[in-house]
Image (cartoon, rainbow, N blue to C red):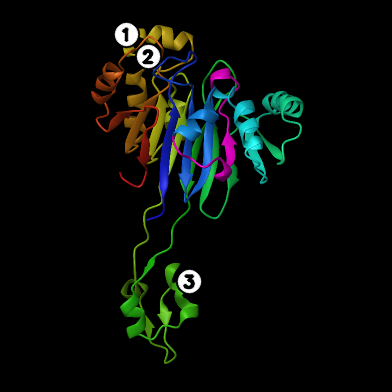
Amino acid sequence: MARLELNILGCGSATMTPRHQPSCQVLNVRDNLMMIDCGEGAQLAVRRMALKPMRLNHIFISHLHGDHCFGLPGLISTMALLNRTSSLTIHIFKDGAELFGQMLDYFCRERPFEVRFNIIDTHKRVIWEDDAITVTSFPLVHRVPAVGFIIREKPKLRHIIGDKVLQFGVPHYAMNSLRQGHDWIAPDGHVIPNEELTTPADPAISYAYCSDTKFSRRVIKQVEGVDWLYHEATYDDSLRIKAHKRYHSTALEAATVASEAGVKQLVLGHFSKRYVDETPLLDEARTIFPATRLANEGMVIDLNQL
């Protein structure tokens, strides 16, 4: 089964603590790395988790609060010092592209690679895709323009049953057609159903990232049916009024999103510095959605394992 791993580099909120760094995570898609948000210290967290910065080709910035993007100059500077040569694409709002473009031209003007900016906005749209996945942005509800991201694997190919294709004499050139689900028509016109020659494809996995956002039924609609949901849980529900004033969510609200959206697994993150132990947040969320876990720096989640 193809590798699809989520690496948590930072799951704290705006103020760093000895326990948590600001928002940052890396999705490993078949050994190609994509970063979602880039809080301070991202370059150090990448190295601590033994990730390969040269395989990091895309960075997706959810919004322009510092705890989600202040790590960009340091990370790019580190890549330059490591003599990276391949281009890097940053998916970011227009203001961020202008700001960080000027900053990089000043501090990293001699970098040996190109930094490209793909301008995003708060409209739902596919902002990037390749032959394996699509990345879709969708609006969140925060104090500044903010988006979440949904990463979806494209439908996978069926698996060939080796002894069966030998038995029926299926030629090599027909294998791709079989993987796509087509029947095999033998030279004598006899049709061998695809189900006799292949087994079902591995399921295509989907992952949604929601940070930062006030609780919203619009968000529930956007993440409906995804396999994995990372949702901010800055506060416990006793601080719901504070959460709403600051356009954040509580753990109970994150669990409500997961439950009503019909997701399979929930990961909580973006914890307030007030908590020295997030277990109460976990317990609170599990009263509504038992399939919940806490994010933590250094955590690696195999998204294929549902």
Nearer the camera: disc 2 or disc 1: 2
Residue 66 counted in the magenta span = yes
In front: 44, or 217? 44
Q: What residue would you read off at disc 2?
A: 235
Q: Is disc 2 in contact with disc 1, using a CB cutoff of under 8 Å?
A: yes
Left or right: residue 211 versus residue 300 is: right
Q: Say whether disc 2 or disc 3 marks the residue closer to the N-terminus.
A: 3
How many residues crowd around disc 2 within 10 Å: few (fewer than 14), some, or many (20 or more)?
A: many
Q: Indicate the secondary structure of the residue bearing disc 1.
A: helix
The image quarter in which residue 232 lies = top left
Residue 54 counted in the magenta span = yes
Residue found at x 43% / y 68%: 179
Q: Indicate the secondary structure of the residue bearing disc 3.
A: helix
Residue 47 percent across, percent down from the top left: 49, 34
In front: 172, or 191? 172
How many residues crowd around disc 3 within 10 Å: few (fewer than 14), some, or many (20 or more)?
A: few
Q: What residue would you read off at disc 3?
A: 176
Q: Is residue 268 visible?
A: yes
Residue found at x 35% / y 37%: 263
Amino acid residing under circle 3: Asn
Q: Which residues are magenta?
A: 49-67
The image quarter in which residue 198 lies = bottom left
Amino acid residing under circle 2: Tyr
Q: Is disc 3 in contact with disc 1, using a CB cutoff of under 8 Å?
A: no
